[in-house]
Structures are given as structure tokens and as C-alpha cells.
């Protein structure tokens, strides 16, 4: 297992990690959290080199993807950088990339009843006004039991500070561009943060910054 104590905070700058091979030639990965070698709860940054493909495989508890670079493809279509994809539990596909791509991928972390297929091109979707100067692009919202999961992109203008707040059900961030800061450190593009239930911080940005953020999806313990 890797980083599977979900009560612990984890901060990883993925740009400093080495690429590791996968079972499929031409597909490389940087594991961030992993329940077992090739199954179960997994979060990774994955690179497909040009013309790489991965065999057809199932998603017992779903798959969530954000395309960071290039064009990611499967039998349902082509998904350019900025695409957000949710493949529900028991779905399957055979992904590939003609020109190469990099993706953030989360496997087997859905509630069984979260069955919505989602495909959003965030390059064309609208930003909504958030708190203060923040802009928010909602991507997914799902309530299951006591937990209420939200997924969104958040755009920070230069010099923006957000209020001190607590994470009920935790928070997970991937910094897409710019650099996020809080009282604990600074997090450049490519940084992945996982903060547990009831953790607190006061984030801010000194330059325009875009983050992929999930809240409310971690154990309430």
C-alpha cells in the first residue's frame, strides 16, 4: 500500500517524481496513493507516450480523470487537455493516445450508487463567481450518507486570500497552474495535496492559479 492512511495529510510535488512503468508498454505513471499493485483505490499521474494504448479494463468502483496535457482517447471519443471525465462503477474502456497525453486519474473511489457519466470540456465551460475574487467551475456533486462530495476547478487571481476554513470530509487538491500557498507551505503546479477530515488552513495565491479540488469525499474519522 502507498499513502492509504486517509487520516494523514500528504503533499507530493509530482514534477520531482520519477516515472514508473505500467503493465502496458508506453504507459508510465507516478503513483500518489495505492491500495494494491494493480487494483483497488488508486490515484496517479499517468503519461501515455504517442501511440500508446492500455488494454480494456473494468472500473469496479468507477474512474475519474482530468486531462493535464495532450489528447486522451478511448472508444467513446477524444478528450483534449482540460477534459474532466467520470466513468461510473462497472464501466470499462480501452484507452489510448495518438499524440501522447498526461492525466490525473483516480480509480475505484466512487460510491456504488454514483452512476453518472460525466464529460466536461473545462476549456469551454463557464466559470461562476465564487467567494471574493475566486472563480469556480463545478464538475460534480454527489451526496452519499453523511458525506457530500464536491469536485470543481477554482481559479485564483493574483493576491487572493481565502478565509480560514475546516475540511469536513477532507480536501484533495491538484495544482494545475500557478502556485498555491497556505500557512504550511507553497505548492507549485503539479503538486498533489490530500488533507484529512477536520483539517484546517488559510490558502492564498500570489499569482493567478488554477486548482482541481475535491472536498467531502474522505472518511469522517
Image (cartoon, rainbow, N blue to C red):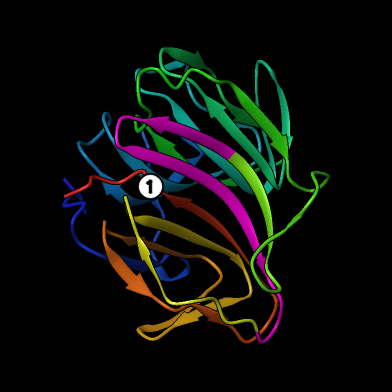
Q: Quadrant of residue 178?
A: bottom right
Residue 58: % across, % down: 41, 16
Q: Say above or below: 44 vs 73.
A: below
Residue 80: % across, % down: 74, 40
* Magenta-drawn segment: 140-159
Q: Residue at x 60, y 28 (%)?
A: 96
Magenta segment's dominant SS is strand
Residue 76: % across, % down: 68, 17
Regarding residue 52, the answer to whether it shows in the image is yes
Along the viewing direction, whichever of 144 and 60 lies nearer the viewer: 144
Q: Quadrant of residue 143?
A: top left
Q: Is residue 55 left or right of residue 145?
A: right
Q: Say above or below: 163 vs 53.
A: below
Q: Residue at x 79, y 48 (%)?
A: 123
Residue 93: % across, % down: 53, 17
Q: Residue at x 63, y 39 (%)?
A: 84
Under circle 1, the secondary element is loop
Q: Is residue 126 left or right of residue 24?
A: right
Is 138 magenta? The answer is: no
Q: Quadrant of the N terminus?
A: top left
Q: Is residue 106 left or right of residue 32?
A: right
Along the viewing direction, whichever of 168 and 93 lies nearer the viewer: 168
* CA neighbours of label 1 inside 10 A, class few (<14), some (14 to 19), many (20+): many
Along the viewing direction, whichever of 165 and 42 lies nearer the viewer: 165
Residue lying at the far right of the rendered structure: 124
Residue labelled with disc 1: 216
Image mark count: 1
Amino acid at each position: 500500500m502507498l499513502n492509504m492512511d486517509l487520516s494523514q495529510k500528504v503533499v507530493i510535488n509530482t514534477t520531482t517524481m520519477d516515472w514508473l512503468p505500467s503493465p502496458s508498454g508506453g504507459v508510465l505513471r507516478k503513483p500518489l496513493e495505492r491500495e494494491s499493485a494493480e487494483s483497488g483505490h488508486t490515484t496517479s499521474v499517468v503519461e501515455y507516450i504517442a501511440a500508446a494504448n492500455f488494454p480494456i479494463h473494468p472500473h469496479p468502483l468507477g474512474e475519474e480523470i482530468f486531462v493535464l496535457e495532450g489528447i486522451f482517447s478511448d472508444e467513446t471519443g477524444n478528450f483534449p487537455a482540460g477534459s474532466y471525465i467520470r466513468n461510473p462503477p462497472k464501466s470499462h474502456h480501452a484507452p489510448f493516445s495518438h499524440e501522447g497525453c498526461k492525466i490525473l486519474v483516480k480509480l475505484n473511489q466512487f460510491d456504488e450508487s454514483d452512476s453518472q457519466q460525466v464529460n466536461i470540456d473545462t476549456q469551454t465551460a463557464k466559470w461562476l463567481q465564487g467567494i471574493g475574487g475566486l472563480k469556480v467551475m463545478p464538475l460534480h456533486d454527489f451526496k452519499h450518507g453523511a458525506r457530500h462530495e464536491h469536485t470543481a476547478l477554482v481559479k485564483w487571481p493574483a493576491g487572493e486570500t481565502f478565509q480560514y476554513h475546516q475540511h469536513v470530509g477532507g480536501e484533495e487538491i491538484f495544482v494545475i497552474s500557478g502556485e498555491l500557498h497556505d500557512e504550511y507551505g507553497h505548492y507549485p503546479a503539479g503538486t498533489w495535496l490530500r488533507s484529512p477530515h477536520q483539517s484546517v488552513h488559510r490558502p492564498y495565491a500570489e499569482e493567478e492559479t488554477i486548482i482541481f479540488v475535491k472536498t467531502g469525499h474522505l472518511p469522517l474519522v
